[in-house]
Amino acid sequence: MGQIEFKGKNFEVDEDGFIASFDDWTTEWVDYVKTSEGIAELTDEHWAVIHVLQDYYRKHGIAPMVRILTKVTGYKLKYIYELFPSGPGKGACKMAGLPKPTGCV
Amino acid sequence: MALKHATPMLDELEKGPWPSFVSDVKRLAAKGNLMCEDWLGLMELSFKEKEGHWKHGGIVGVFGYGGGVIGRYCDRPDLFPNVAHFHTMRVNQPASKYYNSDVLRKICDLWDAKGSGLTNMHGSTGDIVLLGTTTDQLEPIFYELTHDLKMDLGGSGSNLRSPEGCLGMSRCEWACINTQDIIYDLTQEFQDALHRPMFPYKFKFKSSGCPMDCVAAIARADCSIIGTWRDDIRIDQEAVKGYVGGEIVPHGGAGGPRKDFDIKAEVIDLCPTKCMAFDGKTLKIENSDCVRCMHCIRVMPRALRPGVDTGATILLGAKAPILEGAQLSSVVIPFIKMESPYTEFKEFVEKLWDYWMENGKNRERLGELIQRQGLRELLKAVELEPDPRMVNTPRYNPYIFYDPEKVPGGWEHDATEYRKRHQA
């Protein structure tokens, strides 16, 4: 675990750069992560994806399956990769402050 | 040069007449490869403590792709700083694994420079597995791989895994379909599914040219494409006599130079459906009963060959044990002509994936979904008619579960109406 300080806020992160606790998420975090995720400026569409992920996580305690994310946002998966170049799991979930997706490789 | 960590337990694995991965890794470590040196120390610690020291579930990748890189971190970076990051990269193998030595050298040079130098040729899915690199090297490796070597990352996570096929028509006289072309075509066609995970879980295509199934598609692939034929086995009666008379050695000479071939004991009696007969002069095969086990063809390859009206049988649902036990795949399309551009097959796959993505639970393989919902639901989704060939022993079980939609009136019946026609 490492510590990040950005715009007066402190974030505890793991080795993949995910924040340790969803409760620590603030909009400054998104600002901090966007560059390393290959995003210049966030648009409303980025925020739409982030909010869908967060709403789902608050309700179910896990990240949604990709199929659900594309359905709810109405964005095709390829478009989500255009928005978040490292993908919905690594990029969008990280920016939304969700815990790191794990599972079988 | 003395290595940094003593490895008495790993050293045991160097004893005996077999090649040893420990010796290989030590050789690299002795040349000053720091990752290999720490890797040996980490393995020794794991052996000593009987506990793994790799963390589970790192998530790293390259831009634009959601798969192909498996994040790996060690949980004792204080002791083994050079393997603190040790990510795996999967590289999509060329169809049937045909390389020239130039490409192999370039891959090794790339991995020596930007990774640990350790490779696994190949993983069980078929990919080249490059073991051990750091996060900052991922994009440079990806660039070099795709631009200089013209190779691509393979599949990992919940996506289409690198399709795999047997040597097919390039080397084998029994190949009924062009497995190399099929694998290459499917890899190109389904790039999106290969690189951007969208499924409930992993999905594998494997294709074997004949029912011998040299890539074990039936045991491993969610969708197995296995070459077959629908006409008759071709028989060269003169060659049959040659085998019986001891002039031709059976099994292509694999059992040594023998002259005691007994066609009855070694072929006729071993036919699983007893569809063969030999009267001392002519070999007869009742082809309608043949189940394409390939045994007779394998024993007498110069006398018997697959038919000429060739295509593939498509089977679904194999997997290794994870949630449920291991499963072999089951026939859903008894015969399909597999000819480029494979449009009919691809349309079937799209329907299949729609059904699985719509109905599959997280981490549920296609075979498990079919098991949960029944083959009938799958057949409806992919618009196929049920066929006795989809059932292992169709004559064994007389009970048939009809679809209520196909029964006039469904399961609901009016008892009063019934009694008007039938006395109690």
Image (spheres, grey):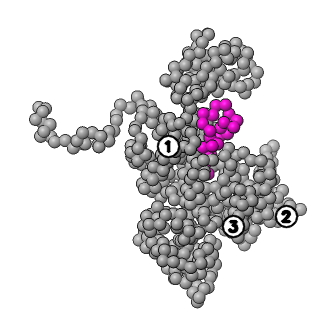
Residue tagged by mark 3? B139
In the image, is B261 to the left or to the right of A61?
Answer: right
Stretch of the chain drawn in magenta: B162-183
Q: Secondary structure at mark 2?
A: loop
Residue tagged by mark 1? B344
Where, by quadrant of the figure, is residue B2 drawn? bottom right
Q: Nearer the viewer, mark 2 or mark 3?
A: 3
In the image, is B405 to the left or to the right of B9?
Answer: left
How many C-alpha atoms fall within 10 Å of the one at disc 2: few (<14), some, or many (≥20)? few
Q: Are marks 1 and 3 on the same chain?
A: yes
Q: Would you say residue B178 sits in the magenta stretch?
A: yes
Q: Would you say residue B354 sits in the magenta stretch?
A: no
Residue appearing at x 60%, y 73% in the figure:
A37
Label 3: chain? Answer: B
Q: Nearer the viewer, mark 1 or mark 3?
A: 1
For the residue pair B77 and B341, the one nearer the viewer reads as: B341
Amino acid carrying mark 2 in the image: Gly
Mark 2 or 3 closer to N-term? 2
